[in-house]
């Protein structure tokens, strides 16, 4: 009678792939890396396909592809080492408060001026680690222990975003900007 040894999930999770011990752990880490890579390429392909249908104004198919993308993306949790060189208060200072609004909840219609957003935050929240790109602030929410992204909306986009009651119209105008 042959005996098969199986690794427990706890053991698999405990393997340090930056320093695998022995051939078996190296093979396990290579398989894990390959699996992540194939999921990432699937997500990239879905995104490209959805963008193609959006550009062709075939929004029903694009929406369905986006739903599939998000369903798969929820299961795919890559890890990133993101430097946070500043705090949230400094990150907000990177944007002209007269020309930008904050979309902190992911609802374009409910964006608010930077000054109003600042007033709602406590001193501790304003000192959370953050990073900035052209139209986003990425910060580490220490209370909820996760990374959040806020959209910073330029003033010239506000008319386009706020005056569209129809979801598809808003989508078309955003895509054309």
Image (cartoon, grey):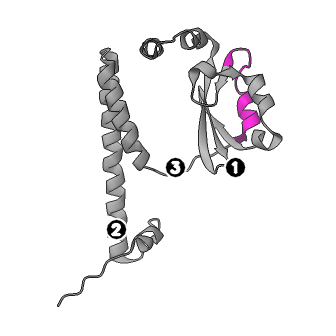
Residue 72: x and y, percent?
A: 36, 43
Residue 99: x and y, percent?
A: 69, 15
**Residues packed near mark 2 inside 10 Å, few (<14), some (14 to 19) or many (20 plus):** some
Q: Answer above or below: position of 17 versus 141.
A: below
Secondary structure of the residue carrying numbered label 3: loop
Q: Residue at x 49, y 52 (%)?
A: 79
Q: Residue at x 55, y 50 (%)?
A: 81
Secondary structure of the residue carrying numbered label 2: helix
Residue where numbered disc 3 is placed: 80
Residue 143, labelled with which disc? 1
Which tag, 2 or 1, sits closer to the chain's start?
2
- Mark 3 or 1: in front is 1
Q: Answer above or below: position of 2 versus 52.
A: below
Q: Residue 58 vs residue 116: left or right?
A: left
Residue where numbered disc 2 is placed: 28
Image quadrant holding the N terminus, namely bottom left
Secondary structure of the residue carrying numbered label 1: loop
Which tag, 2 or 3, sits closer to the chain's start?
2
Residue 39: x and y, percent?
A: 33, 47
Magenta segment boundaries in residue numbering: 86-100
Residue 152 falls within the magenta-colored stretch: no
Q: Quadrant of residue 120?
A: top right
Compare residues 47 and 2 and report the one nearer the observer: 2
Q: Residue at x 47, y 65 (%)?
A: 18
Task: Give the residue at the far left of this rendering.
Answer: 1
- Mark 2 or 1: in front is 1
Measure the C-alpha gap from mark 2 to mark 1: 34 Å
Q: Are marks 2 and 3 in contact (CB under 8 Å)?
A: no
Q: Residue 170 vs residue 151: left or right?
A: left
């Amino acid at each position: 009678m042959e005996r098969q040894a199986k690794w427990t999930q706890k053991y698999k999770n405990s393997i340090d792939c930056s320093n695998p011990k022995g051939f078996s752990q190296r093979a396990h880490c290579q398989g894990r890396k390959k699996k992540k890579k194939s999921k990432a390429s699937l997500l990239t392909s879905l995104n490209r396909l959805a963008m193609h249908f959006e550009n062709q104004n075939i929004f029903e198919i694009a929406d369905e592809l986006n739903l599939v993308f998000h369903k798969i993306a929820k299961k795919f949790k890559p890890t990133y080492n993101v430097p946070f060189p500043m705090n949230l208060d400094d990150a907000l200072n990177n944007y002209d408060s007269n020309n930008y609004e904050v979309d902190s909840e992911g609802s374009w219609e409910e964006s608010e001026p930077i000054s109003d957003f600042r007033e709602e935050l406590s001193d501790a929240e304003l000192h959370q680690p953050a990073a900035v790109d052209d139209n986003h602030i990425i910060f580490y929410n220490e209370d909820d222990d996760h990374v959040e992204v806020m959209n910073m909306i330029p003033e010239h986009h506000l008319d386009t975003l706020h005056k569209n009651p129809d979801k598809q119209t808003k989508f078309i105008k955003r895509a054309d900007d």
